[in-house]
Image: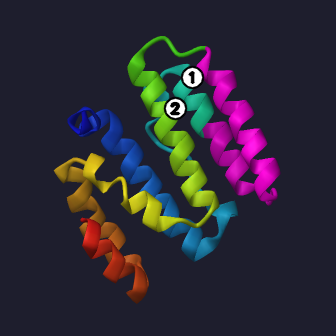
Amino acid sequence: MLDYYKTNDFDILFCYFLDTYIIIQKHGRSQIPPCLFISAESKSVSSFLIEGIELLENAYNNELFDILLSSVYFKFYKDCTNLLEINKLVLINSYIKFLYNDDFISLLNTSNMWSDCVKQYSLSKIYPALDKTLKNEFLKYV
């Protein structure tokens, strides 16, 4: 089942969220760049990613954020036309929550879903940007 996620379709998402974590750590939530692959995605996936990131950029409290993200998730879930789209929505939803909670460890806990390409990317681009504590944690997972 984990091999399902080790494809280019998911590699782009994993790398985007890894990059986004580093950007948030350096510049805050207001500086999150758009995901460049959006135009290639289905309307449901791309729209959910855009709206979910917009929620992340606002300073909502935990409860309000959870309600709003769930509402956006279900708004686009109903328009998904295949299992790939649904799985991408689930992944995006989880990763946005990890970012909101500044929970890099939960993000790392999904590293067994990453392809070798994502692992190499994370070692070369993400690892150097982490603080010492997170670097030690990072190496346990990748």
The quadrant holding residue 2 is top left
Query: Which quadrant, please, contains the C terminus?
Result: bottom left
**SS assignment for the magenta stretch, majority:** helix
Q: Residue at x 41, y 86 (%)?
A: 133
Q: CA distance from mark 1 to mark 2?
A: 8 Å
User: Where is mark 2, residue-wise?
Assistant: 89
> In this view, which residue lies farthest toward the top?
81
Determine whether, in the image, residue 60 is placed left or right of residue 6. Answer: right
Determine whether, in the image, residue 66 is placed left or right of residue 89. Answer: right
Would residue 65 be counted in the magenta stretch? Answer: yes
Task: Give, as a three-letter code, the residue at label 1.
Answer: Ser
The quadrant holding residue 61 is bottom right
Q: Residue at x 53, y 28 (%)?
A: 45
Query: Which quadrant, please, contains the N terminus?
Result: top left
- Is residue 27 placed above or below 112 in the rendered structure? below
Q: Find residue 16 and report its horizontal and vertical position in percent.
A: 44, 51
Q: Residue at x 82, y 49 (%)?
A: 64
| Circle nearer the viewer, 1 or 2 | 2
Is tag 1's residue or tag 2's residue first in the polypeptide sequence?
Answer: 1
Secondary structure under tag 2 reads helix
The answer to whether the residue labelled 1 contacts the one labelled 2, judged by CB atoms less than 8 Å apart, is yes
Task: Give, as a three-letter code, the residue at label 2.
Answer: Leu
Bounds of the magenta segment:
50-78
Secondary structure under tag 1 reads helix
Q: Residue at x 62, y 38 (%)?
A: 50
User: Where is mark 1, residue-wise?
Assistant: 44
Nearer to me, 119 or 138:
138
Would residue 43 be counted in the magenta stretch? Answer: no
Determine whether, in the image, residue 35 is placed left or right of residue 57. Answer: left
